[in-house]
Image (cartoon, grey):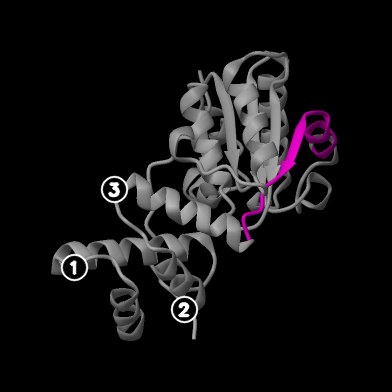
Amino acid sequence: MQLIFDFPVVPRFGFENFVVCSGNRTAYQFAQRLASGSDAENLLYVYGPEGSGKTHLLTALAVALEGRYFSFRDAGSLYRGDFRNEGPSPLAEHFAGADALILDDLNLLPDYQEVRVELWELFNAFYSAGKKIVISGLTPPKELPNLDGHLTSRLLWGLVARMDVSDDDSRRMILKKLAEDRQMALPDDVIDEMLLKVRRDIPSLVYALETINRTAIATKRKVSLRLAKEIFKSG
């Protein structure tokens, strides 16, 4: 039986702890191009399933580009529930003075024409000014719901990359890197047990790793298959 953990840990996101694997290498390389400023490209759209590292990559870019980040998961709070607001654009106010436009979870764009207009105007303002724009969503641009057709076309003008770390090799690489960052010895058989017993999305695996690490420290035991089995059995 696979376990579901309800409170995944959110680690500090940066390029230095981003695990590059086959499913995200293109997106990472594109992000590095934008961060380095080595070419004229200023638009990147990345897409993929939950837990594929999109937020990690966007947050790292926000730091590197000295940009401002916003996730449409927080649209309700930003607009205070009033998406038909006729006053100043909350979205534009959030990004006022920012050097880069970093928008996460575009698939959650509220289905209101007023918000679509605000987003289109904001996008154009940054694009016309030659500022960097990085956006993420679950699907390719043409499959995004509630999006203005003009913006869909614009997204396809830039760099587009899929992110997917759903294979076990990628999961292993990520877990080993996270353990290394925590100076934690993580045996292969413990990773095998995690992949067998824990839901395989990355947030759940990260939380399982944190649980094993905290338990090992609290009980002054080595991280081992026996310890992992005890934790998963009690969970």
* Near-viewer residue (117 or 143): 143
The residue wearing badge 2 is 197
* Near-viewer residue (118 or 46): 46
Q: CA distance from mark 3 to mark 2?
A: 23 Å
Residue at 18% across, 68% down:
221
The residue wearing badge 1 is 221
The residue wearing badge 3 is 183
Q: Answer whether residue 231 is visible to the viewer in this image.
A: yes
Residue at 59% across, 53% down:
52
- In the rendered structure, the answer to whether residue 151 lies left or right of residue 15 reads right
Residue 88 at what x, y percent from top left? Answer: 56, 30
Q: Answer whether residue 51 is visible to the viewer in this image.
A: no
Residue 7 at what x, y percent from top left? Answer: 37, 65
- Res 227 → quadrant: bottom left
Secondary structure beneath dot 1 equals loop
Using a 10 Å C-alpha cutoff, classify the residue at mark 2 as few (fewer than 14 neighbours), some (14 to 19) or many (20 or more): some
The answer to whether residue 225 is magenta is no
Query: Is 15 located above or below residue 233 in the figure?
Result: above
Residue at 51% across, 25% down:
67
Q: Tell me the amino acid under the disc marked 2.
A: Lys
Query: Is 58 located above or below residue 128 in the figure?
Result: below
Q: Tell me the amino acid under the disc marked 3.
A: Gln
Using a 10 Å C-alpha cutoff, classify the residue at mark 1 as few (fewer than 14 neighbours), some (14 to 19) or many (20 or more): few
Query: Is 198 located above or below residue 37 in the figure?
Result: below
Is tag 3's residue or tag 2's residue first in the polypeptide sequence? 3
Label 2 with label 1: CB-CB less than 8 Å: no
Q: CA distance from mark 2 to mark 1?
A: 21 Å
* Near-viewer residue (235 or 226): 226
Q: CA distance from mark 3 to mark 1?
A: 15 Å
Residue 120 at what x, y percent from top left? Answer: 73, 32
